[in-house]
Amino acid sequence: MLDALRIIVKNGALVLFLILQIICFYWIVKYNQRQSQIYFYSGQVYSNLISLQYQSILNYFSLQQKNDSLAEENKLLLKRTFDQINKSNLDTQLHTLSKNLYEIIPANVVNNSLVKRNNTITLDKGSNDGVSKGMGVITVQGVVGIITDVSEHFSLVLSLLHSKSRISCKIPKSGFIGTMVWDGKDPMKLQLEDIQRYALINIGDSIVTSGYSIIFPQDISVGKITSFHVEPGAFTYTIEATPTQSFFNLDQVYIINHPYRSEKENLEHQSEKYE
């Protein structure tokens, strides 16, 4: 107590000065409308800044939860899209049987190569999450690739940007079926093969999955035509397309699976012995 009194006495002039400054500030704000408005406006500004910073911190720590929630919402939207595709191509009875057939597993990209001829993508979901070899991988933008290898916690995707990637596609405007491949050069350019030269096509035409392979539902976006021509003596177009899903910013993906995929593939493999 005595020490505190000594400090006050020793610094009495400074303490008195601070007290008088506070009293003067109070009177100025209280009895002057202009200064009062400035004070309350400034207080509101700084209060809002503090609130925004506080909210930013909260948002940062809840970001993962929001991403997971968004992934679940997109998963439901994709299921609804697949159901609508089934409904538009089958009668009511068959649609009832096929409803919700495609299983959807949200996943995150943990590694993605772009500069190789055979590029792969690593996902953070594996066999413990229900992932198996041969499942398709898409985003809300379009096709990404097919699962080739699986461990307990991770899976490897054969990207569209792989020399062995072959996706059955069609051009909706003309209805012609072809195969989407990659020549190993530009990651923004895919090649659509086997489209007959008499097909009516245009730059900007959409390319979607054909539905011939059960790996992907029908009409999932793959790319858009950027150029085409016919080589002398050729019966098919040389077509280049840009993928609808850019592989430079790949982050959130969805692994999809049809429960009858293995049954269909086994049946088709058995038919090969009759060829």
Image: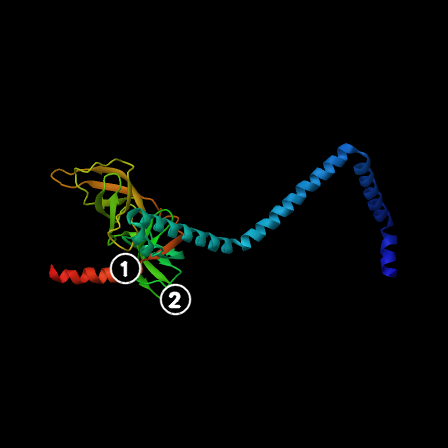
Name the residue located 33 percent from the left edge and 64 percent from the top edge: 150
For the C terminus, which image quadrant? bottom left
Crowd class of label 2 (few under 14; some 14 to 19; many from 20; radius 10 Å) = few
Instruction: Compare marks 1 and 2 and give the one earlier in the sequence.
Output: 2
179 sits to left or right of 258: left
Amino acid under disc 2: Asn
Residue positioned most to the top: 34
The residue tagged 1 is 261
Q: Is residue 187 visible?
A: no
Using the image, determine if residue 140 lies above or below residue 133: above
The residue tagged 2 is 128
Occupied quadrant, residue 232 = top left
The CA distance from mark 1 to mark 2 is 19 Å
Name the residue located 78 percent from the left edge and 33 percent from the top edge: 33
Residue 19 locus on image (x, y percent): 84, 46
Q: Nearer the viewer, residue 177 or 156?
A: 177
211 sits to left or right of 78: left
Using the image, determine if residue 150 lies above or below residue 49: below
Disc 1 is placed on an element classified as helix
CB contact under 8 Å: marks 1 and 2 = no
For the N terminus, which image quadrant? bottom right
